[in-house]
Amino acid sequence: MDGLSMGSNNKNLVAYQQKELLIQRELEPSQVFQEVTIGSLPDNVLLDIFDFYQVVINLNVFMDDRPWDWEKLLHVCRRWRYIVFESPIRLNLQLFCTEKSPVRKLLDIWPPYPLVIQFNYDYTDLECQWEDSEDHCHWIDSMDNLVAALERRDRIREIQVYINNAPDRLFEQIFMAMEKPFPALRSLSFQSVFDSEIFLELDDTFLNGSAPCLRDLSLWGISFPSLPLLLSSTSDLTCLILSDIPDSGYIPPETMATSLSALPKLESLIINFDSLTGRLERRTQAPPPQTRFVLPALTRLDFEGESEYLEVLAARFDAPLLNEFAITFTHQSVFDIPQTVRLLNNYLDSFEAYSLTLTFERPRDRHCASIIFPFNTTHHPVFRPSYLWLIMCKESDRQVVSVTQICSQILPFRSGVKSLIIKWDSDTEVFEDSTLWLQLFHSFPSLQNLQIPAVLEPSIASALERPTEGSPAAAEVFPSLHSLSIVDKMAGKTVQEPIQSFVAARQRSGRLVAVSRVRY
């Protein structure tokens, strides 16, 4: 399930429950508990059942993105066909067009229902001389189907286009067909994938610069400098995804904030830069504005880029319902994020006690450290998304320093952390400077439970046993600590002497710490 689906899934779940109750109410009490044939059900109950089924499909938990196959109901009997055709709006009847659909024939057969276009084509595996191949003929047919569907722009409700390594001229056909308004368009997703540093670019003629009914907009690997012009017309937008933004599509954070201020219904915002820098110019930060606009519906924020960009953006708005976030900061050495922390304070304040996980690993050859927040089941009773900061840098000691910088700024959050879990990838180098751990640990004055991997036991034990000059005594690092777990392959190993010294020091001060070795 992708990011676009989560908000709509919660809404669909409520609709699911409401329709279930409706069916039960419309059946006679005796019918609820006795066996009946499908033919004995009245038309209104059958309609409720059909509607109930399409809501289940739209939950999209176990299904893919295809609209429900309502056409199958037409082949059961004449009565069912009549019920379906009489309720096209309630049953959400749409025509599904793909690169394989005979679109022109399809549009001539069916009534003028709304259109959903899903076009997926992978050029990666085609032969070099593809213009003389069967794949080229298939592509020509596919493009003809897509263009034929785009010609019915007054009926198009949803467009999803994914193309991998296709020639530019083929994209030009698509974009030329979309230079006019699409008055019924609610959802638009363009995803472009290239092996080389080539990005597609949209200009201000795209959709004629206006999409008044648009609710979901997703652009992946697309340069769109004129995006603010389009967003000025999308006051009903609920989801905005800008992923793999190339340098040519860079939009200054001040301009982006101005565009967001016109989106009062926005629920999900995802901004990911393709480059490592996010291309924010180095400059003296201007003071934050005296007034901020409010995004009253925003619940999710994902960001990948430099912290300075997010700081400028976050300084300009408030999001009182924000309760899901994933923030990735790319290679940099200093993190000063007061505005980002301020933006997330409402979420952080919703917890009385916290369990925090710090991971240092190399997923897919990306060196990174992550700060994983707890699940908030109050905000998400069904779906349980994680909340995290991800810091991209190669050296493990820099990862710890970066995590320390961020944790030290998360107030009042850090004072509420009761449990801390540290995970360390086996491929990540263990640094020798144990004082870096001590600096990190001072960010958690209320910690009660600590879990560490065995590979870090010597370094962390050394930090706890011998604090640097001017640092608090070892017994004061974790004044409330009462449990220390060491995760190891061998649960029977003896606890190392530095850990024993730390425990003894705590015991002399009247604070007992239980040490255990946990096997994984």
Image (tube, rainbow, N blue to C red):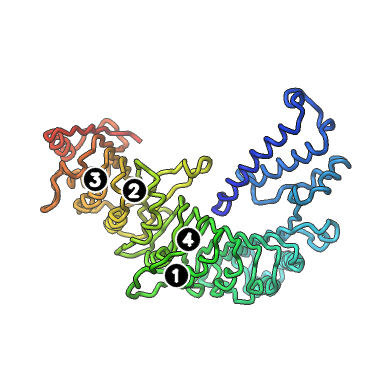
- Other-residue count near label 3 (Cα within 10 Å), few / some / many at <14 / 14–19 / ≥20: some
The answer to whether any part of residue 343 appears in the image is: yes
Q: Nearer the viewer, mark 2 or mark 1?
A: 1
How far is mark 4 from mark 3, CA to CA?
A: 34 Å
Q: Which residue is disc 2 drawn over?
A: 358
Which residue is the site of mark 1?
253
> 58 left or right of 437?
right
Residue at image coords 83%, 56%: 110
Mark sitting earlier along the chain (3/1) = 1
Secondary structure at numbered mark 3: loop
Separation (CA) of disc 2 from disc 4: 32 Å
Q: Residue 445 got which mark?
A: 3
The amino acid on which the numbered mark 3 sits, given as a three-letter code, is Pro
Residue at 31% across, 50% down: 412
Name which of mark 3 and mark 2 comes first in the sequence: 2
Q: Examine the rendered structure and indicate whether residue 320 appears above or below residue 213.
A: above
Which residue is rendered at x = 30% and y = 56% of the image?
A: 409
Of badges 4 and 3, the one in the foreground is: 4
Residue designated by label 4:
294
Between 326 and 190, which is closer to the camera in this rendering? 326
Q: Position of residue 117 (x, y in %)?
A: 70, 60
